[in-house]
Image: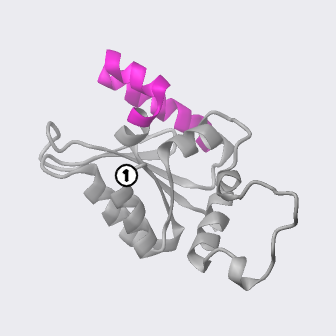
């Protein structure tokens, strides 16, 4: 099953020191650098649909604008509408196929409510955009102790957490 990555563009840019420095020089530079990194990821995982959503609520057009670049859909929200609202609308359609990339707690909670998975912006950048050998599952694991861990259903993560991990492994 292919996934639909829905990326909160400015959230990812502002969580990354490299992209944030480019954005400080010029807004367009930060967006272009993010899209270039995502295009590289898209070549590695072409089966996943990628949608990047940018805020246009203060200076955007009267209509939501959409663009395509390197096989990705880029959406600028219309004036008066935040990117979060567009992302929630997309997550509502995608449900379990959707994976939101954002550090925004409200979006993460909404993704959990509709059955979608989520990954924080720094975690996604480190594990998928930077090419580091870092996996999101490694953070969730307890450090090993001298005695073996107890086994059994009471020590198993909740079903939603296991499903989220399974979807994130596909990234």
Looking at this view, is 91 or 134 the one in front?
Answer: 134
In reply to whether residue 26 is colored magenta, the answer given is: yes
Quadrant in the rendering for residue 132: top right
Give the x, y percent position of residue 130: 63, 33
Residue occupying the far front of the picture? 146
Q: How are the residues colored?
A: one colour
Residue occupying the far top of the picture? 25
User: Could you tell whether 70 is left or right of 154 in the image?
Assistant: left
Residue occupied by mark 1:
104
Quadrant in the rendering for residue 58: top left
Which part of the image, by quadrant, shows the N terminus?
A: bottom right
Secondary structure at badge 1 equals loop
* Depicted 129 relative to depicted 166: above or below: above
**What residue do we see at 59% from left, 43% from top?**
42
* Depicted 137 relative to depicted 158: above or below: above
Q: Which portion, as a residue range, is magenta?
A: 14-42
**What residue do we see at 65% from left, 52% from top?**
139
Give the x, y percent position of residue 82: 22, 51
């Amino acid at each position: 099953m292919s996934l639909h990555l829905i990326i909160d563009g400015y959230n990812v840019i502002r969580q990354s020191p490299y992209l944030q420095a480019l954005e400080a020089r010029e807004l367009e530079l930060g967006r272009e650098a993010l899209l270039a990194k995502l295009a590289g990821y898209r070549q590695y995982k072409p089966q996943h649909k990628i949608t990047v959503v940018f805020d246009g609520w203060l200076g955007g057009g009267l209509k939501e604008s959409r663009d395509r670049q390197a096989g990705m859909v880029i959406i600028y929200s219309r004036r008066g509408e935040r990117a979060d609202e567009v992302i929630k609308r997309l997550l509502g359609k995608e449900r379990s196929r959707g994976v939101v990339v954002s550090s925004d707690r409200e979006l993460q909670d909404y993704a959990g409510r509709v059955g979608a998975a989520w990954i924080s912006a720094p975690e996604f950048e480190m594990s998928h955009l930077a090419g580091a050998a870092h996996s999101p599952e490694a953070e969730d694991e307890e450090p090993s102790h001298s005695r073996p861990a107890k086994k059994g259903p009471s020590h198993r993560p909740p079903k939603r957490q296991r499903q989220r991990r399974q979807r994130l492994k596909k990234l």
